[in-house]
Image (tube, rainbow, N blue to C red):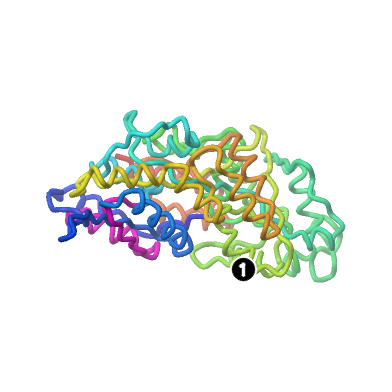
Amino acid sequence: MMPTPRIRWAGALLGAAMLVLPACSSSGDSGKVTLTYRLWDEQQKAGYDQVMAAFEKAEPGIDVTVELLPYDQYWTKLTADVVAGAAPDVFWMTPTQFPEFVTKGVLAPVQVDAAKYHKTVVGSFTYQDKLYGVPKDWGTVGLLYNKDLFAKAGVEMPDKLTWAADGSGTLLDTARKLTVDEAGKHPGEPGFDPDKVRTYGFASWNHYQTQWMNWVVSNGGKLVDKPFGKYAFNEPAAVQALQFGVDLVNKHHVSPPATRTNPPTGKITDMFKAGEVAMFPANNALLPFVAPEATFEVGVAPMPEGPAGRAVNLNGLAETVYAKSEHPEEAMKLAKYLGMAEAQKIMSDGGYAFPALDGLSQGYVDYWKSKNVDVSPFVEEAAGTTFPLPITTGFTGFETKLNQLFNEMYLGKLSPQQAADQAVSEGNATVK
């Protein structure tokens, strides 16, 4: 799961800057062109070191310098570099940051066969009918679960988990069976104490990518009315879905209280790793941070189906080219190479990410199979109904307020309708 940004976009500064200074690339005495490539994932850098070695072998006239920045510094530094006209030649891009960069002319359009890549990733980086990033990878939301807790409770994972706003469906039923208090009681049984729960059946909390956005779309609601459009998650179908997520915590007591899980200091991942939560919706990108530390066997199941079917967030990244690169031809060669099978197979086979290029997922599946984790449900979901994070200007500045309002909603201090109305109003005020 991609970490969610906590910085505000320096839009006015960027918009006012005249991007005329050279980029970070250079040509040395050897006659070679040196390109700068920037990413934020230390684990993936090991794979990219292999990829860049292969690229430099194929393109002996180009050297690539790989820059690694922590995620919380990445966007601040990138914004400053763009303003100074000194951005890296090729760099990672997310769907939520994409609108801010593309609408300010920072990114160069790319020419690749879009039909060969996952359609949701392609759509995430398309603006005015042009593609502005070579699709890199995707991660999607699945249901991680503790097989040991299921076995201890004598519960089998249903063939299909389902939910509805009224609480019907196999998800809530299964979560109740897996939720137990210190006296051994389950929710709904006489004497059950929601303040003394030993093990929770499900993790419902304020995390938009893996939680409420999936409920909204699976209930027939919308996040935005159209790409680069307005927020719409305060409409009835969306609010019903938000109520369901909150009810899992405050009404049904199958999920930990928001006092323990609300961002930015929530402990839900630690609770899952500690065996205190049985089912945990998570992006597959979280596996390297969870599976090695878990003291139990980790299972993966598809996300539950809502009244409108199953719809899951698929969050892809792109390799974007700086429009003011000093060596645009070489930068474009690098970006295109990173979208080819040779490069994406290295990253897939190394278990780093699902490749955006269709037909290469098996390497990722095989890697995690060797770690005793079956990730094939993620592949199944990716072939179904998927949606990106909201692609519209202003999201990165709006995100902090959104989380504040929804923290209050999960705490029960705001109703889902109140929280959604306020969030949509404030969010739409940031859309340009």
Name the residue rendered at 62%, 55% in the picture: 367
Front in this rendered view, residue 118 or 309: 118
**Residue 66 colored in magenta in the image:** yes
Left or right: 166, with 429 as reference point:
right
- Describe residue 112's horizontal placement relative to residue 284 as left or right: left
Q: Can residue 300 be seen in this view?
A: yes
Residue at (58, 66) in percent of width and height:
259
- Residue at x 41%, y 57% (from the top left corner): 5
* Residue 106 drawn at (x, y percent): 24, 45
Image point (74%, 70%), residue name: 196
Per the image, label 1 sits on a secondary structure element best described as helix
Instruction: Please state the horizontal and vertical placement of residue 124, each as a whole percent of the image.
Output: 42, 39
The residue indicated by pointer 1 is 270
Judging depth in this view, the residue of 243 and 133 nearest the camera is: 133
Total labels drawn? 1
Label 1 crowd (10 A; few <14 / some 14-19 / many >=20): some
User: Quick one: 41 or 229, which is closer to the camera?
Assistant: 41
Find residue 425 and report its image quarter: top left
Q: State which region is magenta.
A: 62-91
Image coords of residue 338 (percent x, y): 40, 46
Question: Would residue 110 be found to the left or right of residue 169 on screen?
Answer: left
Can residue 418 be seen in this snapshot? no
Instruction: Quadrant for residue 282, please give it.
Output: bottom right
Quarter placement of the C terminus: top left
Answer whether residue 247 is magenta in the image: no
Where is residue 312 drawn, in percent x and y? 58, 41
The amino acid type found where label 1 is placed reads Asp
